Amino acid sequence: MRDIPTIFVANSAHTLYLTLFYCWSSAEIVDFSVEQTSLSDFSPAAHAEVRALKVIPLSLEKGDLALRTSVWVGKREFSDRIRQPEHPSKGVLLKSSCLPFSIGGHNRQVPPTPTRWHHRPNRLMLKRQNKLILNRDQQDAMRRAGRVNAQLLDYLRPHIKAGITTGQIDDLVHQWTHDHGHIPATLGYQGYPKCCCTSVNEVICHGIPDSYVLKEGDIVNVDITTIVDGWHGDQSETFLIGEVSEERRSVTQCAFDCLYLALDALTPGCTVSKVGETIVPEAHRRGFSVVREYVGHGLGKKFHLDPSIPHFPTRQSRIDRLEPGMCFTVEPMINAGTRYTQSDKNDGWTVRTRDGASSAQFEHSILMTENGPEILTLTEHGPRPGHCF
Ligand code: MF3
Ligand code: CO
Ligand code: CO
């Protein structure tokens, strides 16, 4: 998953003002959320849902990262409208092409890229620069990476049951990947410490494998990414551990169905928003919510590339197109309760539902072809479209 950009790295203690300077009209601000890590003093307003907010002061200290995830005004999203800091000399704005994804690893220093606000290329320009159309050989390399990743998931499948620890699942990923001569992409990625993510029950994503023993009734998302000859395969599945509650079963079913519904809707050259336009109504119809802070992404020689693939429609996703030759992920995270997220203040990675209700996710790596989307990470033994959990 990729965080929606706009990051401010403070290089001294001061206050950063997030100002919705364009919303002073009658437009109602329906939703505003700010996520940040390693802030010792965090303004309570920042985590609240607020209406008609104009200015939010955030107290920053040296090395702190501030990340604004999304601002919604009525039905429109403004995801990159953060005001220029009062004192640009006190910090550095990172442009989206060099942003650190997943703002974890809270002690990590992000190398500042001094870009002058006024000379910053706008987001559309960046998108165009970074759009990656793969040639035939590169497409085949992505097919190989996807296949290897899927084989790894099939290898793990029988082991993912009550009694195993998430750390042992990670050990299996490590060993298998090493034995096959590949590299686990998450290990050391932005300081992430493990070879996969294991997200149990209310954990939405980026759960760190540890000594937790899976037990009957749990649901666990296992997300693996393998680098094969320099190219990435990225996918995840949510596994039911024995008999689970009806809520956990149905939220898992919903995430699974949403992934395939979205894939069905994609056509060569369609807008990225097709993904969100398919997923949101389906999830809502079933009484569930769609996570917004973490999104799918372009994929290739790098783990996270443009375009962002949000699972809800955005202004940008109505512009971006999925053209033949592009590789990307679709990875809806569906929550049984509120869509709001809370990342762990201690490990800087684990993302949970704010209300503690369960969350499920499925992910595939996709190549758009002239004939429509091709799933690169199809497993042999995993659930097929139409599967009933
Ligand atoms: N595999 C996740 C994705 O689908 C990303 C995990 S990044 C990590 O994009 F650092 F948290 F592992
Ligand atoms: Co992904
Ligand atoms: Co993934």
Image: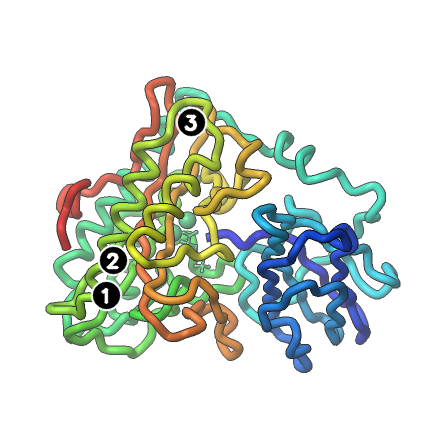
Quick one: label 1 or label 3, which is nearer the N terminus?
3
Is there CB contact under 8 Å for labels 1 and 2? yes
**Could you tell me which residue is drawn at 51 percent across and 79 percent down?**
346
Q: Pinpoint residue 13: horizontal percent, then vertical percent.
A: 80, 76
- Indicate the secondary structure of the residue bearing disc 3: helix
Q: CA distance from mark 1 to mark 2?
A: 6 Å
**Could you tell me which residue is drawn at 65 percent across and 56 percent down?**
28
Q: Pinpoint residue 382: horizontal percent, then vertical percent.
A: 17, 47
User: What residue is shown with label 3?
Assistant: 138
Q: Pinpoint residue 371: horizontal percent, then vertical percent.
A: 33, 19
Q: Which mark is residue 248?
A: 1
- At label 3, which amino acid type do we have? Gln
Q: Which mark is residue 5?
A: none
Quick one: label 2 or label 3, which is nearer the N terminus?
3
**Residue 261 found in image quarter:** top left
Left or right? Give the position of 259 relative to 53: left
- Asked whether the viewer can see residue 174, the reply is no
**Could you tell me which residue is drawn at 54 percent across and 43 percent down?**
314
User: What residue is shown with label 2?
Assistant: 252
Answer few, some or many: residues within 10 Å of disc 3's Cα (few below 14, many 20 plus, some between 14 and 19).
some
Left or right? Give the position of 333 relative to 176: right
- Indicate the secondary structure of the residue bearing disc 2: helix
Q: CA distance from mark 1 to mark 3?
A: 39 Å
Q: CA distance from mark 2 to mark 3?
A: 33 Å
**Could you tell me which residue is drawn at 78 percent across and 67 percent down?**
16
- At label 2, which amino acid type do we have? Thr
- At label 1, which amino acid type do we have? Arg
